[in-house]
Image (cartoon, grey):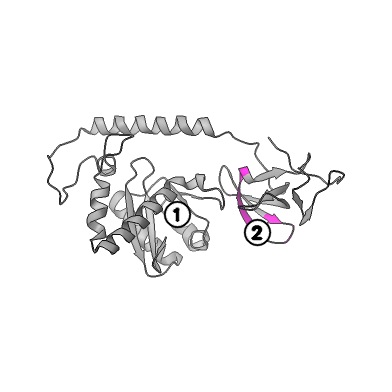
Amino acid sequence: MEVDGRQYLITVDYYSNFIEYDYLSTTTSQDLIRKLKGQFARFGAPKMLITDGGPQFSSNEFLRFTRRWNINHIRSDPGYPRTNGKAEAAVKIMKNLILKTKHNGDDPYEALLELRNTPRQCTGFSPAEMCLKRSPRTLIPSTSKCLSEHVVADKKENYKRQVKRQYDKQARDLPKLHLGQTIYYQNPGQTGWYPGIITEQLSRRSYKIKGDNGGFYIRNRYHIRPRKTILKDTDVYDGNVLDDDDDKERPDFF
């Protein structure tokens, strides 16, 4: 995340919504790994880490880091933010927090402390309570309370079930694609479809594609279609508008 020319690393726990942020002097893999190690040393290594598809997260150095720490690393897909919507929301929150505290001359860490201790409507607990099973002391006087570990665990499990139910309502798996399979892919913000071939499956719904133009792209399964059936006559094939009488192979729609 960039704010006023400064780069920050934003991480968020998926279920508790506990946010961490670090200033980055550079955006190299080495600097990112160092900051992540500090966070993981405090809270423990996650089983899964979802990042964007930036080159820092695609390097061999980052791959070795996730393997050593036994982390399942998933890169989200360009143009399909719902694959990492939790991080997108955290970035917006932190960007607003940093800008607002800078404008008011306040301490961003004090604001972050209060943010972590503010109860969320969906769980009734704050991110700190959900993540740490306790309510850290803040600068604002409050009634001390000791949370039962079982109560917090139950709340987390209920929230997980709610998230899964909501996801299952919206998501449906498209047929799996195979290495070497010829496909059409869509570019973010465009309606046209371009020919390519599957070169690697990066995660359950993410694929690496080699386009017929020689470029390599990462796309979500949602933006990939096998070559067959018919496209609308306004869609694109290899840079040209398709006509109704065009007999080239075209993507399936499910």
Res. 71 in view: no
Give left or right: position of 228 versus 92: right
Q: Nearer the viewer, residue 54 or 39?
A: 54
Q: Residue at x 30, y 54 (%)?
A: 41
Q: Residue 160 location in percent, x, y?
A: 39, 33
Residue flagged by tag 2: what amino acid is it? Phe
Q: Tell me the mark number nearer the camera, choosing from 1 and 2.
A: 2
Residue flagged by tag 1: what amino acid is it? Thr
Asked if the residues shown at circle 1 and circle 2 are in contact, with their CB atoms under 8 angstroms apart, the answer is no
Q: Quadrant of residue 125?
A: top left
Q: Residue at x 23, y 34 (%)?
A: 149
Q: Quadrant of residue 173?
A: top right
Q: Residue 182 location in percent, x, y?
A: 74, 48
Q: Quadrant of residue 7?
A: bottom left
Residue 66: image tag: 1
Where are the magenta residues, as a range? 210-222
Disc with the residue nearer the chain's start (1 vs 2): 1
Q: Residues within 10 Å of mark 2 (few under 14, many from 20)?
A: some
Label 2: state its secondary structure. strand
Q: Residue 210 location in percent, x, y?
A: 69, 56
Give left or right: position of 128 versus 170: left
Q: Nearer the viewer, residue 99 or 172?
A: 99
Q: Residue at x 31, y 36 (%)?
A: 121
Q: Give yes or no for residue 221 being in the magenta stretch.
A: yes
Q: Nearer the viewer, residue 34 or 186?
A: 186
Q: Nearer the viewer, residue 8 or 192?
A: 192
| Residue under pointer 2 | 216
